[in-house]
């Protein structure tokens, strides 16, 4: 199973990451999977209470985050028989419209690829040590204590 | 008998908890020779951390653990408020 | 709702299509969706019976295919409240490893984006007038009468 | 009284059915003046198409239809073997 996980302290471009990942897989003799399911999450322009959002701050637990993402991805891909897995996640100050997360799962069939991508996304939303703080236009901020509903 | 850094327990707080407590990284002296077994629950009380521990998740050496999992000298203990990634 | 559907008679590059789609949306004032669910399907190197596959031939019903894809996509996106939908589909002779289909759904939340992407993929597999013929290494060929299992 | 192309019914076959039948596009003369109502089922039999119609889907003017939906002069009728896209 091909696995790559990166945390980005500055803005990342999902399509550029995917191109790089595709090249990396090709170099390793792994041609395009029959089924690839992808997810890109971006920062909304509004805070949870509807106020204008200036930025989303993503705190994480250095060391544990990477380790936990690796464990979650490995377990999820094994469960679904996925053959490749790319996870890119932002940390730090993320602006509205910027990508927070990219998950790309390759598998031999569409069902496993889709299920694996969804499950891993839920896992990293709930089981990885990330914390979000919303910064509003008036200078106030608040830590989120949960995720947006599915 | 060992480095102080190995003897102690490193305690980490994150996000809202870190801000409420006013600190994020602390060393708890716990000599390796001590026979007493410490738990996250005991350390939470001893450190007089704010709020209720039941809303926190606990990690020992960067793996999720329970409130009564023993913490040993040299361990890294973290209290984690509800997470929100992705 | 932003909708774009293309049939490609020659190989298309999914990531290049996505970049172009992203630019088109930006020009129309549609910034990146909070949630984007994508699927890329590629030709397998083996036929349904396990024989080496030389090519997959995709026949379609010109006119009806485009019309049907548009109907399916519009209905699916309306059902899930998706805000953007890109469908790219190959026709003609497709080689192993080449992309057959790309579906990209933008929505405000991950659940609707994922469900819409999955449903639309199933719809175009079962409700659009495409037919696949497998060409094997020995020169023989066979029309497929169904899709690979989900 | 109308163009011949408008009067007739265009019949299209696809994929395996087209190959078994040996043709893919045929014009069925059906003058607009004729009072008779034709259905896909009747045309399937009249054209002596191979296999059973029940395994086919039917499209009239590029919209899915039923075996007994009336087909009118000027219509495009297609018999579609099981599809497999994506």
Image (cartoon, coloured by chain):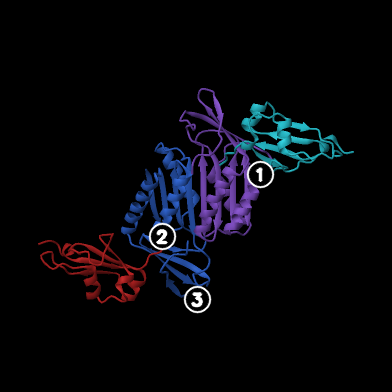
Chain colours: A purple, B cyan, C blue, D red
Marks 2 and 3: in contact by CB < 8 Å?
Answer: no
Q: Which corner quadrant holds the N terminus of chain A?
A: bottom right
Q: Tell me the SS state at disc 2.
A: helix
- In the rendered view, tell whether residue B32 sits above or below residue D24: above
Instruction: Please tell me which residue lies in front, B82 or C54.
Output: B82
Q: Is residue D66 left or right of residue D33?
A: right
Give the residue at mark 2.
C125
Q: Is residue C8 among the parts visible in the rendering?
A: no
Instruction: Please tell me which residue lies in front, D35 or C59.
Output: D35
Residue A140 location, x and y as percent?
Answer: 54, 24
Q: Is residue A53 left or right of residue C64?
A: right
Give the residue at mark 3.
C138
C-alpha gap between disc 2 and disc 1: 38 Å
Q: Residue at x 65, y 35 (%)?
A: B53
Specify the quadrant of the image occupied by residue A125: top right
C-alpha gap between disc 3 and disc 1: 49 Å
Q: Are the residues under marks 2 and 1 on the same chain?
A: no
Total numbered labels: 3
Q: Tell me the SS state at disc 3.
A: loop
- In the rendered view, tell whether residue C4 sits above or below residue D17: above
Q: Are the residues under marks 3 and 1 on the same chain?
A: no
Which residue, as the protein is rendered here, is positioned at the far right?
B1
């Amino acid at each position: 199973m091909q696995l790559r996980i990166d945390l980005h302290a500055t803005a990342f471009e999902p399509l550029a990451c995917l191109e790089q990942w595709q090249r990396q897989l090709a170099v390793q003799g792994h041609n395009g999977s029959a089924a690839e399911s992808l997810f890109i999450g971006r920062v909304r322009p509004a805070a949870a209470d509807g106020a204008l959002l200036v930025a989303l701050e993503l705190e994480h637990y250095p060391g544990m985050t990477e380790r936990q993402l690796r464990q979650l991805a490995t377990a999820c891909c094994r469960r679904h028989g996925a053959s490749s897995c790319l996870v890119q996640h932002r940390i730090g100050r993320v602006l509205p419209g910027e990508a927070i997360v990219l998950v790309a799962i390759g598998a031999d069939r569409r069902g496993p690829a889709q299920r694996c991508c969804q499950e891993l996304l839920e896992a990293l939303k709930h089981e990885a040590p990330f914390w979000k703080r919303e910064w509003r236009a008036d200078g106030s901020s608040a830590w989120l204590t949960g995720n947006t509903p599915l | 008998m060992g480095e102080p850094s190995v003897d102690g327990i490193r305690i980490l707080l994150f996000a809202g908890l870190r801000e409420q407590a006013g600190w994020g990284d602390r060393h708890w002296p716990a000599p390796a020779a001590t026979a007493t077994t410490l738990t996250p629950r005991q350390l939470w009380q001893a450190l007089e951390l704010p709020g209720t521990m039941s809303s926190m998740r606990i990690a020992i050496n960067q793996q999720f653990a329970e409130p009564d999992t023993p913490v040993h000298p040299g361990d890294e203990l973290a209290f984690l408020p509800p997470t929100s990634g992705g």
